[in-house]
Amino acid sequence: MSLADEIRQHALQHYVEPARSTHQPTVTIRAGDICRNLGLRGRTPSVCSALESSAFLSLGGLKLLERTGPRQSTTTRFRYAIGQASPDAAKTSSAEPGATDTPHETWAQPVPTAPSHRGRDDFTVVIQCAATKQPEAGHLIGEDGNPILFVARPDRAPKTKDILYQRPDDLALDGRTWRAHLLDYNRRSHNPLGILPAWQLYRPPVYGELADAFGLENLFILSAGWGLLAAGFLTPQYDITFTNQADIHKRRSRRDRFADFRMPPDDREQPVVFLGGRDYVGLFRALTRGSAGKRIVFYNSANAPDVTDCRCVRFKTTTRTNWHYECARALIDGTLDLPL
């Protein structure tokens, strides 16, 4: 039985069926209670995904009325209306859609916890990464058994015995880079370290909203640590940024050499829309150079970025910090004027 099946079965047996047997019209399940009952540490995203999956709703004869709290947290609560249970509620399949641990062979495939695609697919969306990550997201593990936190300058990181600081392109003991290890990890059929796909790694909810609106195949994340990532690529904890205000060990200089991933295929003819700050425009241009589609860069400063190979469009807003989230929501709502 997969982890997703175990979560669903536990929720059905200990929450849904007792409520149904006493003729209660609704039932509420708190993600943290499931984590505690099953002894799951660092698997809150898996619990939340299982509790809102179509497989769980079908098996339990449930309708999800509301989800309250953070997107994926121990305090997230799910309230359901109770209907007629599926006759298969006592037996689940590890290959059901929505099962967090369903095998995926390569990073290019959407992960099974992805939201349903309901929007346009005539352009590709690239959004800058976020500094805040899900606190329970998984790490790669070093040879000493300690979790790795990837940073721009490990030699300037604070000294600690519990964290191994590395650059993505540092070498492991086997002579391969951690970047190569991460690619191999994404090719596995299981995810024992609980590493999240890129669209789930970042805490701001706009990443999930974009995935829901445009589909994982049309969404990419521009990461200062890893490069241009497919939204479904399993991405470990890291703390690397171009922002000058960040601590020096986190700060990546434009002169630093990184073997950045470049995952969108060049033969995609759809326009590519970039949502992000000026510090990230250079990396976006470098990693999309050769793209067959038109490249559109949104900005909100008084002056456009000095780029001649992209179409620059000003997004007018009084928001200064993370203005591109507002721009992303306008894109989702269809109120953004796109020069396609």
Image (cartoon, helix red, strand yellow):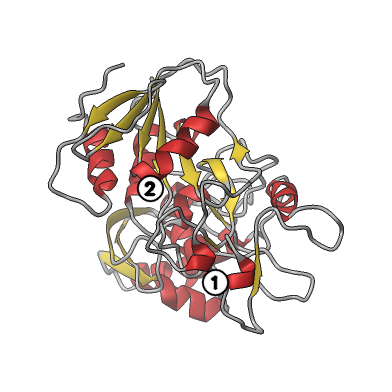
Measured as percent of width and height from the top left, residue 289 is found at 53, 25
In the rendered image of this protein, does residue 217 appear above or below residue 244?
above
Residue at 31 percent across and 16 percent down: it is: 340
Disc nearest the viewer among 2 and 1: 2
- Residue under circle 1? 42
Q: How many marks?
A: 2
Crowd band around label 1 with a 10 angstrom C-alpha radius: few (<14), some (14–19), many (20+):
some
Q: Nearer the viewer, residue 297 or 218?
A: 297
Instruction: Indicate the quadrant containing the N terminus: top left, top right, bottom left or bottom right.
Output: bottom right
Any part of residue 111 in sight: no
Q: Earlier in the sequence, mark 2 or mark 1?
A: 1
- Relative to residue 28, is residue 303 drawn left or right? left
Which secondary structure, mark 2? helix
Crowd band around label 2 with a 10 angstrom C-alpha radius: few (<14), some (14–19), many (20+):
many
- The circle on residue 207 is 2
Query: Which residue of the protein is positioned furthest toward the right in this rendering?
Result: 174
Label 2 – label 1 distance at C-alpha: 20 Å
In the rendered image of this protein, does residue 287 appear above or below residue 267?
below
Which secondary structure, mark 1? loop
Any part of residue 102 in sight: yes
Q: Nearer the viewer, residue 40 or 322?
A: 322
Query: Which residue of the protein is positioned furthest toward the bottom in this rendering?
Result: 161
Q: Nearer the viewer, residue 8 or 218?
A: 218
Give the residue type at disc 1.
Answer: Gly
- Relative to residue 5, is residue 1 drawn left or right? right
Q: Nearer the viewer, residue 238 or 101?
A: 238
Give the residue type at disc 2.
Answer: Tyr
Residue at 52 percent across and 55 percent down: it is: 252
- The circle on residue 231 is none
Measured as percent of width and height from the top left, residue 190 is found at 69, 54
Measured as percent of width and height from the top left, residue 48 is found at 44, 61
Residue at 31 percent across and 68 percent down: it is: 27
